[in-house]
Image (tube, grey):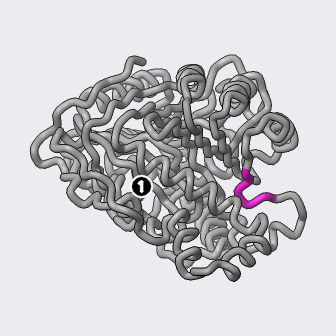
Amino acid sequence: MAVQPAASVPDEAPASDGFQFPGAWYTQSKPVFLSGNEVALLRGGDELFPAMVRAIEQALHEVWLATYIFHDDPASEAVAKALIAAARRGVRVRVVVDGFGSSHSLTTVKRWFSDNAVDLAVFRPLTRWWNWLQPGQLRRLHQKLCVVDGTRAFVGGINVIDDRNDLHHGFSDAPRLDFAVALHGPVVAPIEQTVRAVWTRATFGRDWRKETLQLARSAEPVRAARKLLRRMHLLPATPPPLADDTPVVAAFVVRDNLRQRRTIERCMIDAIRMANARVQLVTPYFYPGRSFRRALIKAARRGVQVRLLLQGKLDYRLAGLAARVMYDELLTAGVEVYEYTPAFLHAKAAVADDEWATVGSSNVDPLSLLLNLEANIVVRDTGFAAALSEELDQAMAVSSRILVAPLRTGLSAMLGRGLVAWLAHWYLRLAGSSERY
């Protein structure tokens, strides 16, 4: 899909005046919209990977990439070769992968990169059984980000793996339904800061004795410690130039376990609450909390067309059960529910009315909303919203609409809801989360 230049939006769009220094976005609980961006919607790895490879081939200084899965199939290898070629011509290339998501292919990926000057970091590695006993191991890196030379970025839900390859079910004829966004403009800055922060967290402690000694021996240990924390976005940094006065178009939002715990969730709930005509939401894993569920139901009851696109072809049966225990309540309120059956569903996106849209890595379930590191891009642009809405309309047209909840009444429904709630409760407690959901 062609790059869509930033289009004008109504005067009531939030201003970007609050963006005062590079770390400022990180202290905000609401999206910080920045102006003057170009955005392009990409469908699946078939569109994302060639665009990403072209950007990497043009890199002059540095490339940052963060992903949950970096697989070792031919599609992934094409991206790896582009990264290796960039590193060989002197570009600094740093890649961070999740220790659990990339566990199947980590040996191969390490071999690819270690021999070819690409710096690889593993976020919370699981190389030994006792790694599971360390705090926070259930909180995974789920972001999918790539930044080239600080000017171009890619954000979405697409892992570095072939669209037709599923880790548990093998190859299929039809590609997964998934989306990413290519970006150019001021909004790239916070995306790059996020990848740098994830890299710092993944590498910090790898040589902790050396790091500790360097801090202790420093002539100014406090300043050295502040510099390290600044790289992890725990402290503000130097103010950059303010954004210009052109229309606000995009905001980068994250979910982490420091200050941005519920930013993505609140952002989506606010958009649903403000919707006047329609809400479209696609996610493979759907088990929303009380506030999210109420927002959807109230929107439907006040006449907003609320349409959900969920998995029909299940990759995890428990995830399917978790979503389906919600169907009766949603259908009764007038929410339209569709299950995507042509292929596996992996997209995480939403559209509200005619100008608000988001694409990213965050599902609508406890893992994404309360535990994992997630990243979404929010776009205020009529052209982008229309393009994404058309994609979702087409996907729903080939999906199965659910008219009767499969677990509507009786003992099976009660047991299903109870089992899912019990599992979600204890998983969150085991992961160290005590937040209300």
For residue 305, side relative to residue 92 (left or right): left
Q: Which residues are magenta?
A: 121-125
Q: Which residue is mark 1?
A: 329
**Does any portion of residue 394 appear in the rendered image?**
yes
Which residue lies most toward the front here?
A: 219
The residue sitting at 12% across, 40% down in the picture is: 10
**Does any portion of residue 279 appear in the rendered image?**
no
Between 93 and 26, which is closer to the camera in this rendering?
A: 93
Give yes or no for residue 231 being in the magenta stretch: no
Disc 1 crowd rating (10 Å Cα; few below 14, some 14-19, many 20+) is some
Q: Quadrant of the N terminus?
A: top left
Between 262 and 322, which is closer to the camera in this rendering?
A: 262
Residue 372, image x, y percentages: 59, 59
The residue sitting at 25% across, 55% down in the picture is: 273
For residue 230, side relative to residue 45 (left or right): left
Give the main secondary structure, helix, strand or loop, of the magenta stretch: strand
Residue 317, image x, y percentages: 69, 46
Q: What is the quadrant of residue 260 in the picture?
A: bottom left
Residue type beneath disc 1: Glu
Residue 51, image x, y percentages: 53, 23
Query: Mark 1 falls on what kind of element?
Result: helix
Between 276 and 372, which is closer to the camera in this rendering?
A: 372
The residue sitting at 47% across, 75% down in the picture is: 436
Q: What is the quadrant of residue 247 in the picture?
A: top left
Residue 210, image x, y percentages: 77, 71
Give yes or no for residue 122 being in the magenta stretch: yes
The residue sitting at 58% across, 39% down in the picture is: 62
